[in-house]
Image (cartoon, rainbow, N blue to C red):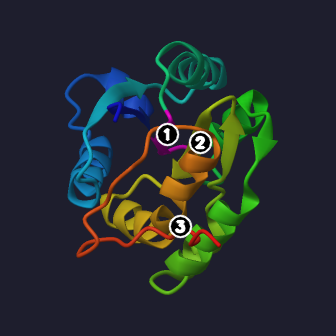
Amino acid sequence: MSKAKIGIVTVSDRASAGVYEDLSGKAIIEVLNAYLTSEWEPVYKVIPDERDVIEATLIDLADNQDCCLIVTTGGTGPAKRDVTPEATEAVCDRMMPGFGELMRTESLKFVPTAILSRQTAGLRANSLIVNLPGKPKSIRECLDAVFPAIPYCIDLMDGPFLVCDEAVIKPFRPKAK
């Protein structure tokens, strides 16, 4: 079984402003460590809210780093600098709108401003790219909602087989006939 490479990208202008602790990227790693029992390797990046930088990073992680999954955090709101969904759509071959729909539905259980979030997901070659919000608490809520479908999606793209701790998260894989 091959070790899965998972890209983790924090999009934030605060990262280039000096002292910055990336709580969101660390939250993604923490959640994935709790979910996954199979071996995986994070490919971790902190980048500014610049569309060309986001696009180049996603392309590199998918095409050169061979990440089966790329999870971004930040840049999904309505502010002018929030361009992560646009960058994701620009580099994807096909979009997976159900991910964003489910994440917003789940987030609405906690905050009415979830409708302002524009997170999305798409496929580039053999990579699934998923945009998450920037708050660590929201990251866990959104991943809890969508992650059960992620291992099967990666299976369908001939990616590495992700094994989960089913006491923490139960992936859904249809049973063979």
Dot 3 lies on which element? loop
Q: In terms of depth relative to the viewer, which is nearer, 9 or 1?
A: 1
Q: Secondary structure at mark 1?
A: strand
Q: Is residue 161 left or right of residue 31?
A: right
Tell me the magenta residue range: 68-75
Residue found at the far top of this picture: 64
Residue at image mark 3: 173
Quarter that holds the N terminus: top left
Indicate yes or no whether the magenta region holds residue 72.
Answer: yes
Q: Are marks 2 and 1 in contact (CB under 8 Å)?
A: yes
Can residue 99 be seen by looking at this rendering?
A: yes
Q: Tell me where residue 51 appears, x and y as whole percent.
A: 65, 25
Give the tally of numbered discs: 3
Name which quarter of the figure residue 46 lies in.
top left
Q: Is residue 110 left or right of residue 115?
A: left
Position in image of residue 68 (x %, y %)? 50, 35
Identified at 35% across, 31% down, the residue is 2
Q: Are marks 3 and 1 in contact (CB under 8 Å)?
A: no
Image mark for residue 128: 2
Q: Earlier in the sequence, mark 2 or mark 1?
A: 1
Question: Which quadrant does the C terminus fall into?
Answer: bottom right
The residue tagged 1 is 69
Q: Does residue 6 sit above or below 130 in this rendering? A: above
Magenta run includes residue 40 = no
Horizontal placement of 158 versus 122: left or right? left
Residue type at the position of mark 2: Leu
Mark 1 surroundings within 10 Å by alpha-carbon count, few (fewer than 14), some (14 through 19), many (20 or more): many
User: Residue 8 or 67: which is nearer the viewer?
Assistant: 67
- The answer to whether residue 81 is seen in the rendering is no
